[in-house]
Image (spheres, helix red, strand yellow):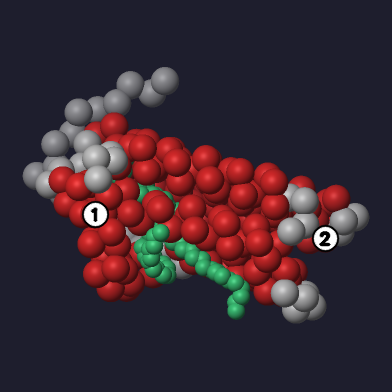
Amino acid sequence: MLNSLARASVSKVTDPIGRGLLRSGLTPDLITIVGTIGVIAGSVALLATGHLFWGTMVVTFFVLMDLVDGAMARARGYGTDFGVVLDASCDRIADGAVFGALTFYAFGQGDTVLGVAGLLCLVTGQVISYVKARADSVDLPIGGALAERAERNILGLVGAGLAGLGVPYALDVALWLLAAAGIVTVVQRLVQVRQAAVRAAADPTRHRTGRPAL
Ligand SMILES: CCCCCCCC/C=C\CCCCCCCC(=O)OC[C@H](COP(=O)(O)O[C@@H]1[C@H](O)[C@H](OP(=O)(O)O)[C@@H](O)[C@H](O)[C@H]1O)OC(=O)CCCCCCC/C=C\CCCCCCCC
Ligand SMILES: Nc1ccn([C@@H]2O[C@H](COP(=O)(O)O)[C@@H](O)[C@H]2O)c(=O)n1
Ligand SMILES: [Mg+2]
Ligand SMILES: [Mg+2]
């Protein structure tokens, strides 16, 4: 949702940053990798150990680098196939680190209910993206959805940041909302794929190669 709504406005901020970083000799791939390592480090060292406020700050800074590598690719004039795969793979690793760390923290506190919410966020977040990737791989383009990556990161990080500031139940509310939205979004994406497949099957111009059932 935010991806389609906010992308153009966010680009007004990230595009000049991307141009500057490119001029300084850095590459989009390097920014993708540094951003991911930063998210992992912040998640493991701070979020997982209960330093929720500073963990949120550090992770947010590095998560935002994911918006800058694309801006650098645009400033350079082209993205690469490797960049597309690297960017999406690093997104999955970063998401796993954030929600894995919050889950670890919750279980470490003896809060099994919060831990289960964290696990649901972790798994549904990965599945939401996986369904889209598999649909892309069989040429079934699908549109936006309820809890895409930006929404997942914002909800998880705002919950963790507010909990770090001492707001009671902030993380519980955020993770349970996200777990519910995540489950709804998995179903929504599968329905979108089904509808796209039905449309494709009815399209006489679509090239059918036929696929061996492996
Ligand atoms: C009083 C509060 C105290 C608590 C403190 C809170 C502090 C901060 C709290 C929260 C802020 C969190 C910000 C997190 C922003 C996350 C943005 C983000 O994740 O964007 C990624 C998203 C998608 O990116 P991609 O296209 O690269 O990735 C695709 C995605 O992974 C798909 O997965 P799916 O969505 O399907 O599950 C894959 O399918 C696909 O393959 C993959 O390519 O980008 C967007 O959605 C763009 C819009 C983002 C809007 C975010 C608003 C952020 C706010 C400010 C931006 C300012 C920019 C400054 C840049 C500075 C850089 C250092
Ligand atoms: N290392 C990279 C990273 C990204 N790209 C290109 O940018 C697109 C993603 O941009 P975001 O702002 O959404 O991260 C990606 O699909 C690639 O086209 C790249 O080439 N190399
Ligand atoms: Mg990126
Ligand atoms: Mg990305």
* Residue 33 vs residue 125, the one in the foreground: 33
The image position of residue 20, as x and y in percent, is: 24, 54
> Does residue 145 lie above or below 5 as drawn?
above
The image position of residue 173, as x and y in percent, is: 71, 73
> Does residue 190 lie above or below 161 as drawn?
above
The residue at the point 16 percent across, 46 percent down is 76
Which image quarter holds the N terminus? Answer: bottom left
Which image quarter holds the C terminus? Answer: top left
Mark 2 vs ligand 1: CB below 8 Å: no
Q: Which residue is mark 1?
A: 20
Q: Nearer the viewer, mark 2 or mark 1?
A: 1
Q: Is residue 17 left or right of residue 171?
A: left
Name the secondary structure under disc 2. helix
Can residue 210 be seen here? The reply is yes
The image position of residue 133, as x and y in percent, is: 38, 42
The image position of residue 45, as x and y in percent, is: 69, 46
The residue at the point 64 percent across, 49 percent down is 43
Residue type (three-letter) at the residue carrying disc 1: Gly
Residue type (three-letter) at the residue carrying disc 2: Val
> Does residue 189 lie above or below 205 as drawn?
below
Give me the C-alpha separation between circle 2 and circle 1: 45 Å
Q: Which residue is mark 2?
A: 113
Q: Is residue 114 left or right of residue 60?
A: right
